[in-house]
Image: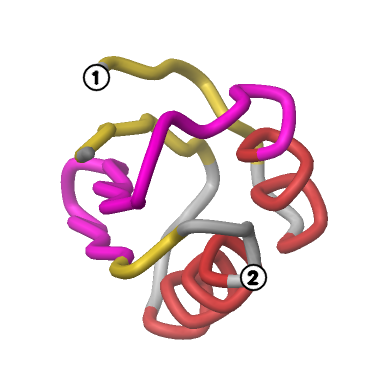
Amino acid sequence: MESVYTVKGMTCGHCVSSVSAEVCRLDGVTEVRIDLAAGSVTVTSAGPLELAAVAAAVDEAGYELAGARS
């Protein structure tokens, strides 16, 4: 399953690394791809992810989840 999230505040490679590391820790996540210019985070997972869990992971990295689409 693939979901795309919009994350506010990412501006550099460090941002990408931080968000990737936190989202990768979620159960079932197999891949995280980030388009820094678009502010999008594409997550591939074994099943649906709880939006609250993704938001918490992004928050832990220091950024804000601004939207989601599957």
- Residue 11, position in %: x, y? 42, 62
Q: Is 57 one of the magenta-colored residues?
A: no
Q: Is residue 41 magenta?
A: yes
The quarter of the picture where the N terminus appears is top left
Which span is picked out in magenta?
32-53
Q: Residue at x 35, y 50 (%)?
A: 46
Q: Say which quadrant the C terminus sits in.
A: top left
Q: Secondary structure at mark 2?
A: loop
Please provide percent x and percent y for residue 67: 44, 16
State left or right for residue 31 relative to residue 16.
left
Question: Of 22 and 13, which appears nearest the observer?
Answer: 22
| Residue that badge 2 annotates | 25
- Name the residue rendered at 78%, 41% in the picture: 56
Left or right for 47, reference 39: right
- Amino acid tagged 2: Arg
What residue appears at the point 18 percent right and 52 percent down from the top-left corner?
Answer: 37
Q: Circle 1: is it few (<14), some (14-19), or many (20+) Cα within 10 Å?
A: few
Query: The residue tagged with tag 1: helix, strand or loop?
Result: loop
Mark before the other along the chain sequence, 2 or 1: 2
Could you tell me residue 19's position as x and y percent?
A: 55, 65
57 w.r.t. 67: above or below = below
Expressed as whole percent of the image width and height from the top left, the position of residue 38 reads 18, 42
Say how the picture is coloured.
secondary structure
Marks 2,1: beta carbons within 8 A? no
Of 14 and 48, which appears nearest the observer? Answer: 48
Name the residue carrying label 1.
70
